[in-house]
Image: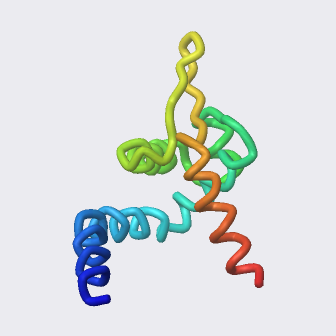
Amino acid sequence: MESKKQELNLELDDYIEDVADLFKILGDKTRTKILSVLQKGEANVSTISELVGLPISAISHQLRTLRQAKLIKPTKVGKEVFYSLDDEHVSLIFECALAHVKE
């Protein structure tokens, strides 16, 4: 039993800092609002700004943070950039967190 516990702890130790960093990023209301918008589909900075109710510059700053954390991805269409959730894991994290707080 002790061996399994040590094995689990070693595996967690490899990722625990990254998981903590992810929760820090998700702990910001503005970033959570942006993820909520993108949960419904892709959007450009202007649309996100309008829906979140903050200036484009503030949204751009938060988008950069979300991109660096690999939570969202940009897609360039002509001169315009659209953002979407990076993958289904991000959607699942958001859905699970929302379901949890609704209980």
Q: Is residue 39 above or below residue 92?
A: above
What quarter of the picture does the C terminus occupy? bottom right
Q: Is residue 11 left or right of residue 31?
A: left
Q: Residue furthest top?
A: 78
Q: Residue at x 55, y 48 (%)?
A: 55
Q: Residue at x 69, y 49 (%)?
A: 39
Is residue 22 toward the left or the right of residue 54 in the image? left
In front here: 39 or 92? Answer: 92
Quadrant containing the N terminus in the rendered view:
bottom left
Q: Residue at x 45, y 51 (%)?
A: 62
**Residue 17 figure quarter:** bottom left
Q: Nearer the viewer, residue 17 or 52?
A: 17
How many numbered discs, if any?
A: 0
The image's colouring method is: rainbow
Left or right placement of residue 27 versus residue 68 in this view:
right
Q: Is residue 27 above or below residue 54?
A: below
67 horizontally vs 46: left or right: left
Residue 44 position, x and y percent, is 62, 33
The answer to whether residue 53 of the structure is visible from this angle is: no
Instruction: Give percent across and percent down for residue 59.
Output: 51, 47
Q: Nearer the viewer, residue 51 or 73?
A: 73
Q: Position of residue 31 (x, y in %)?
A: 52, 58
Q: Position of residue 93 (x, y in %)?
A: 59, 61
Q: Is residue 13 visible?
A: yes
